Image: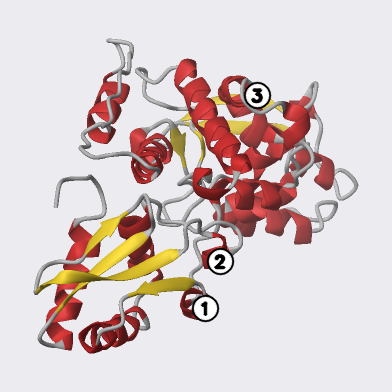
């Protein structure tokens, strides 16, 4: 059985809702409950709609970054809590095996860089904020500022509100409002702009996040990684290979009926999108992402097992990464049941 006792501040409706959403489970936890609990907590913490983190543009796969304009009810202590969650996931993953725990988020490269003590420069805009990079950074790099009459830059950053009204002007260097940017200093200007937008704007938020993270994982252990290595360690991979899947799974059951259903399963999975594969993984393992090494690093291995029923929905035992497939009359009936199960049954636990 599983019993969870969590205390939270009465002033934080955000975390009250978070706890209500993630602690409504019934089951015996041999790993699957824990994985899904972390999956849901990370989803709530790092979803831009929650307000704690944000993206630099509206694209669905945009990288998340600490939000300097977060709602008033979200405090710095919430970033510290987020850091502790990430630290706990890293610690669990270091234990290996069934303890591996991935973070459901894709952080901006500049944020990851600051977690490992690297200095941020303008090239981080290319991945973190590609729209700004193409519209401004790249244009400045390719423009002759010494002769251009259309572009007159100074070492300042103009801050606007959501309605487009100018709020304030920040000098990027001492007396920056009087220092014009030239070809010789454009890189210095762009680096200073990156420091202001990606670092200084969120300094308190990042310091609080690091306080929570480094309380579990010391900074000297994080500094041995670069940004890409840290992301892979934290988040695993969201790319799914059917060949990798077929090469790294276990089948339990050998009847003629089950071999037919198994053939239908591979036919269906072969047409899955990346989103549908993520749902299948979430349904079966409690986590929508794979370890850095793919299916071969899942522990236990992904198991496909014959269920002693007919026409029922597929079920899963996330503690064992086990998918149980009943028998069906036709491929169409099987596919409909599988898609319904992974679409509607990816969260929560119950008695079968």
Provide residue 202's location: percent of width, then percent of height.
Answer: 58, 27
- What whole-number distance in Å separates the C-alpha atoms at marks 3 and 2? 30 Å
Please give the name of the residue rendered at 66% of the width and 46% of the height, measured from the top-left corner. 230
Give the residue pinned by disc 3: 214
Report crowding for label 3: few under 14, some 14 to 19, many 20 or more residues within 10 A (C-alpha): many
Residue furthest front as drawn: 254
Placement of the N terminus among the 4 image quadrants = top left
Q: Nearer the viewer, residue 304 or 60?
A: 304
- What whole-number distance in Å separates the C-alpha atoms at marks 2 and 1? 8 Å
Please give the name of the residue rendered at 48% of the width and 70% of the height, measured from the top-left corner. 240
- Residue 36 drawn above or below residue 215: below
Give the residue pinned by disc 2: 296
- What whole-number distance in Å separates the C-alpha atoms at marks 1 and 3? 38 Å
Observer-side mark, 1 or 3, equals: 1
Q: Nearer the viewer, residue 131 or 100?
A: 100
Give the residue pinned by disc 1: 247
Please give the name of the residue rendered at 27% of the width and 85% of the height, measured from the top-left corner. 264
As helix, strand or loop, the secondary structure at mark 1 comes to helix
Relative horizontal placement of residue 193, taking residue 147 as reference (left or right): left
Relative horizontal placement of residue 333, taking residue 117 as reference (left or right): left
């Amino acid at each position: 059985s599983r019993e969870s006792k969590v205390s939270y501040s009465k002033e934080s409706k955000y975390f009250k809702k978070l706890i209500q959403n993630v602690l409504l489970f019934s089951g015996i936890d041999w790993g699957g409950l824990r994985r899904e609990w972390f999956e849901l907590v990370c989803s709530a913490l790092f979803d831009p709609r929650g307000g704690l983190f944000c993206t630099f543009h509206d694209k669905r796969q945009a990288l998340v970054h600490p939000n300097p304009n977060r709602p008033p009810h979200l405090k710095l202590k919430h970033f510290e809590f987020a850091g502790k969650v990430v630290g706990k996931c890293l610690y669990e993953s270091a234990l290996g095996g069934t303890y591996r725990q991935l973070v459901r988020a894709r952080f901006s490269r500049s944020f990851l860089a600051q977690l490992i003590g690297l200095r941020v420069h303008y090239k981080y805009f290319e991945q973190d904020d590609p729209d700004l990079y193409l519209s401004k950074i790249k244009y400045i790099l390719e423009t002759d500022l010494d002769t251009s009459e259309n572009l007159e830059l100074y070492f300042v950053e103009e801050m606007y509100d959501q309605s487009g009204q100018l709020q304030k002007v920040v000098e990027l260097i001492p007396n920056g409002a009087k220092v014009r940017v030239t070809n010789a200093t454009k890189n210095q200007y762009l680096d200073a702009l990156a420091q202001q937008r990606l670092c200084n704007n969120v300094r308190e938020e990042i310091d609080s996040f690091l306080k929570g993270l480094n309380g579990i994982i010391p900074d000297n252990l994080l500094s041995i990684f670069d940004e890409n290595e840290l992301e892979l360690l934290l988040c695993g991979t969201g790319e799914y290979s059917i060949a990798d899947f077929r090469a790294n799974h276990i089948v339990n059951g050998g009847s003629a009926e089950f071999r037919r259903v198994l053939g239908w399963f591979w036919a269906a999975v072969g047409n899955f999108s990346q989103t549908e594969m993520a749902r299948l993984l979430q349904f079966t393992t409690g986590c929508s992402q794979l370890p850095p090494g793919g299916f071969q690093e899942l522990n236990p291995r992904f198991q496909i097992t014959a269920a002693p029923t007919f026409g029922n929905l597929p079920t899963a035992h996330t503690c064992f990464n086990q998918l149980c497939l009943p028998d069906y009359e036709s491929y169409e009936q099987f596919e409909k049941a599988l898609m319904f199960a992974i679409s509607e049954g990816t969260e929560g636990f119950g008695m079968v």
